[in-house]
Image (cartoon, helix red, strand yellow):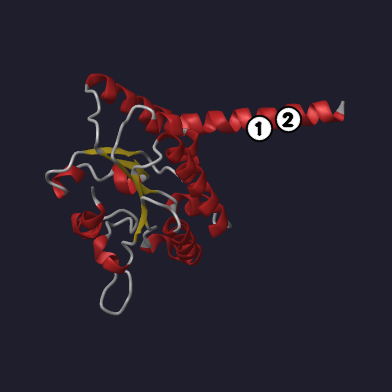
Amino acid sequence: MKKTLSALLVFMFILIFSQEKKAMFWQEIQDFKKLDQKNAPPKDAILLIGSSSFTKWKDVSDYFPGKTIINRGFGGSRLTDLNFYAEDLLQPYQPKQIIIYCGENDFADDEKLKAATVLERFKTFYHTIREKFPNIEVDYISIKYSPSREKLWPQMKKANILIEEFLQKEAHAHFIDITKAMEDSSGKVREDLFLEDRLHMTPEGYQLWAKVMNSYMK
């Protein structure tokens, strides 16, 4: 009886958790589907997947003239959300490259979260991509060090190191480090690259990202 009750409680927890996740970003995913139904997504595009740093990059195509880009950044998503919505984020597309920016919000959501856990979350999503797209380029943009989240930087830095080490062993994959480009001459994060929330970036911040990313873009 106790085992049955325990199993029921676990099932209810998973159900509630799943519904919570659905409530958080379900509408954004539906909006993507409507866009794809209205205009069939182009083949051989560069697919951006990730959190608000992509979501707010509305004019990303202007930074990469001549390249076809599909931006599927949504909300303040975490790697757990990318894994939850993986089929919706990957199934409709036939990209030649996927670039990911996600992980920063995982730490913001749980200040006790360890870098190793974020690595495993990323690896789960990466392997899901590889099941569908074995040979395309898959790149990960390093977690940026937002001034408003300075107390989280130590674990973020560890996560960047772990993810970079993982990708170095993978074929057709790169770690795109944008952290150096966002530092001043003394090695400190440039706060002028951020909006008043000290979290999201100014156009100059995106220009620096684009400059670093350009050599990786297919």
Q: Under tag 1, what secondary structure? A: helix
Q: Where is residue 60 in the image (x, y as percent from the top left)?
A: 20, 45
Q: Which residue lies furthest to the bottom in this view?
A: 186
Residue 216: image quadrant is bottom left
Q: How crowded is mark 1: few (under 14 residues within 10 Å), some or many (20 or more)?
A: few
Q: Residue at x 28, y 66 (%)?
A: 182
- For badge 1, the amino acid type reads Phe
Left or right: 216, with 17 as reference point: left
Horizontal arrangement in the rendering, residue 82 relative to residue 18 (left or right): left
Q: Tell me: residue 194, above or below residue 106.
A: below
Query: Tag 2, which secondary structure?
Result: helix
Marks 2,1: beta carbons within 8 A: yes
Callout 2: few (<14), some (14-19), or many (20+) C-alpha neighbours within 10 Å? few
* Residue 202 in view here: no
Task: Indicate the quadrant containing the N terminus: top left, top right, bottom left or bottom right.
Answer: top right
* Depicted 70 relative to depicted 91: above or below: below
Q: In which quarter of the image is residue 141?
A: bottom left
Looking at the picture, how far across and down is residue 162, in whole percent? 49, 61
* Residue at image point 32% right, 69% down: 189
In this view of the protein, which residue sits in the foreground, 206 or 45? 45
Residue shown at 74% from the left, 26% from the top: 8
Task: Decide if residue 63 is in sight here.
Answer: yes
The label on residue 13 is 1
Q: Name the residue under label 2.
A: 9
The label number, if any, that marks residue 125 in the structure image: none
Q: Distance between the residues labelled 2 and 1?
A: 6 Å
What is the quadrant of residue 178 in the picture? Answer: bottom left
Between 127 and 201, the one lying in front of the other is 127
